[in-house]
Image (cartoon, helix red, strand yellow):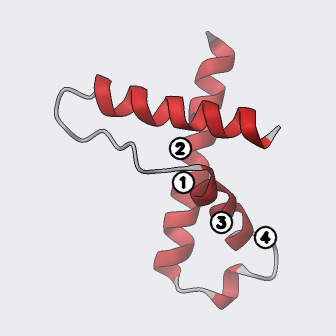
Amino acid sequence: MNEKRSTLLENICQINAVANVEGKGRDDFDLAMLLQSESLLQPGKVATYSRAVTCVAKNVRETFEAYRALMRQY
């Protein structure tokens, strides 16, 4: 399952990088970043990291979840 997820995430990043006409697209995010963000947000771990790290981890998770919701809609 991680291979499929990784491929999906890689494709999302490639689409984002190519489709963004303002040059703000990113293709350097990978499955490891998503998994690390999830790990950082586990109960009990959040308090051990700075607010900035927690904020980035939440943004990564929320962005991926928003994209998944959009794909479900289509």
Label 3 close to label 4 by CB (< 8 Å):
no
Check disc 4 and give the amino acid type: Gln
* Residue named by callout 4: 42
Check disc 2 and give the amino acid type: Thr
- Classify 10 Å Cα crowding around label 1: few (below 14), some (14-19), many (20 and above): some
Helix, strand, or loop for circle 4?
loop
Distance between mark 2 and mark 1 Cα atoms: 5 Å
Q: Residue at x 78, y 70 (%)?
A: 42
Helix, strand, or loop for circle 2?
helix
Label 3 close to label 2 by CB (< 8 Å):
no
Point out residue 37 in the picture as x, y percentages from the top left corner. 63, 63
* Residue named by callout 3: 36
Quick one: label 3 or label 2, which is nearer the N terminus? 3
- Classify 10 Å Cα crowding around label 3: few (below 14), some (14-19), many (20 and above): few
Distance between mark 3 and mark 1 Cα atoms: 10 Å
Point out residue 13 in the picture as x, y percentages from the top left corner. 45, 36
The C terminus: image quadrant: top right
Query: Left or right: where does residue 15 sit relative to residue 20?
Result: right
Instruction: Name the disc covering residue 60, or none.
Output: 1
Q: Is residue 8 above or below residue 26?
A: above
